Image: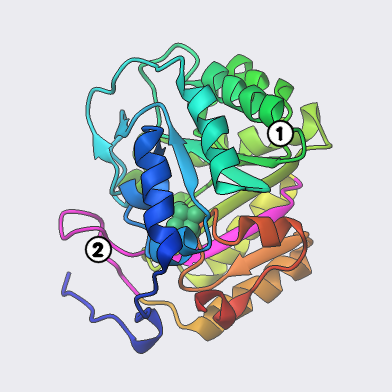
């Protein structure tokens, strides 16, 4: 497929201030990984400058090989039992009131890393019981016992991304299943309705508008509360190509449709990512549509 030049709305001014150095130093001192850096998120400068980061647990090597993702694939390192303490220290050092914690997918572990997520939640709560904790979890290969470990640790938000429409799973997420991801969200809602559920997708992978609307309805069928939609950006030419740069007006259309379908909040814009302005989303002050790029 021919390379499509980036449109004007995807040119982001380079921003950075003294907080950048501070955040990088904290992460390095505490030996913490972030999805911001590992996934080469386009918002890294902006988020680090406002002392926000999304911690990535269980190392920086993933056992899956999704066609859209920049995270290294291979044999991951053993689980580090001291990591929960360091994440909690990181939350404190950055002064976070809302923390997003995710992980690489660890299909090599019997529980997919679920117990480790629970330990991290516990460690953060022990250090500061007021912090809002959002976990962005893998599918644990549909293992309900593993998922229950996370639910029972009672984070405030459980986020699990569907990433794309069902039709594109075989090329974009071949080691995952669309219905399994929907089922995960349903189980969270069923087991503990006090936990907010959240999901997200990337557009520009070749999906059609109607297919996106159907995906939103599928998520609402699981009573999913919160939604993020962002532009897919190919990390390299070896990754899935960008099929389309979706216009900001279409993002706004998706956002309005999501609210019409009953999501409590929806952030939709070219630079929106699962954890982008996560705190504001919970506080019901999200920046939607075209403004999400600012
Ligand atoms: S949007 Fe999320 S992943 Fe990207 S830099 Fe911000 S906190 Fe990190």
| Residue 106 visible within the image | yes
| Residue 147 visible within the image | no
Classify 257 as above or below 24: below
Q: Residue at x 34, y 81 (%)?
A: 11
Give the mark nearer the N terminus: 1 vs 2.
1
Relative placement, left or right, of 97 versus 77 is right
Q: Closest to the observer: 113 or 177?
A: 113
Mark 2: few/some/many CA within 10 Å (<14, 14-19, 20+): many
Q: Residue 290: say if magenta.
A: no
Q: Which mark is residue 241?
A: 2
Q: Which mark is residue 51?
A: none
Q: Position of residue 204 (x, y in %)?
A: 39, 68
Query: What kind of element bears circle 1?
Result: loop
Q: Magenta residues?
A: 223-244
Q: Closest to the observer: 277 or 163?
A: 277
Q: Position of residue 41 (x, y in %)?
A: 37, 58
Q: Position of residue 62 (x, y in %)?
A: 32, 32
In terms of image quadrants, where is residue 48? bottom left
Q: Which quarter shows the N terminus?
A: bottom left
Query: Total number of numbered labels?
Result: 2
Q: Residue 227: say if magenta.
A: yes
Is the shortest distance between ligand 1 and the CB of mark 2 under 8 Å? no
Query: What kind of element bears circle 2?
Result: loop
Q: Which mark is residue 128?
A: 1
Is the shortest distance between ligand 1 and the CB of mark 1 under 8 Å? no
Q: Closest to the observer: 5 or 131?
A: 131
Q: Position of residue 69 (x, y in %)?
A: 32, 48
- Distance between the Cα atoms at labels 1 and 2? 43 Å
In terms of image quadrants, where is residue 125? top right
Classify 111 as above or below 99: above
In terms of image quadrants, where is residue 262? bottom right
Relative placement, left or right, of 223 versus 25 is right
């Amino acid at each position: 497929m021919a390379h499509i030049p980036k449109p004007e709305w995807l040119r982001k001014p380079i921003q950075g201030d003294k907080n950048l150095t501070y955040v990088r130093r904290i992460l390095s001192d505490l030996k913490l990984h972030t999805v911001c850096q590992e996934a080469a998120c386009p918002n890294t400068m902006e988020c680090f400058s406002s002392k926000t980061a999304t911690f990535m647990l269980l190392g920086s090597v993933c056992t899956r090989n999704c066609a859209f993702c920049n995270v290294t694939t291979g044999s991951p390192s053993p689980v580090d039992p001291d990591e929960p303490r360091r994440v909690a220290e990181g939350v404190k050092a950055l002064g976070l009131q809302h923390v997003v914690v995710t992980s690489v997918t660890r299909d090599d572990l019997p529980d997919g890393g679920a117990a480790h997520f629970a330990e991290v939640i516990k460690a953060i709560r022990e250090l500061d019981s007021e912090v809002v904790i959002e976990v962005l979890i893998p599918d644990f290969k549909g293992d309900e016992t593993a998922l229950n470990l996370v639910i029972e640790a009672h984070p405030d938000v459980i986020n699990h991304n569907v990433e794309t429409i069902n039709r594109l799973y075989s090329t974009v997420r071949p080691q995952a299943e669309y219905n399994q991801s929907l089922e995960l969200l349903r189980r969270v809602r069923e087991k503990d309705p006090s936990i907010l559920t959240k999901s997200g997708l990337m557009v520009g992978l070749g999906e059609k508008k109607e297919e996106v609307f159907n995906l939103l309805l599928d998520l609402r069928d699981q009573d999913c509360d919160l939604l993020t939609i962002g532009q897919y950006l190919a990390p390299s030419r070896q990754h899935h190509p960008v099929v389309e740069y979706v216009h900001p007006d279409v993002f706004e259309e998706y956002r309005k449709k999501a609210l019409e379908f009953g999501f409590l909040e929806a952030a939709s814009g070219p630079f929106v990512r699962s954890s982008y302005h996560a705190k504001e989303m919970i506080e019901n002050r999200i920046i939607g549509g075209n403004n999400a790029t600012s």
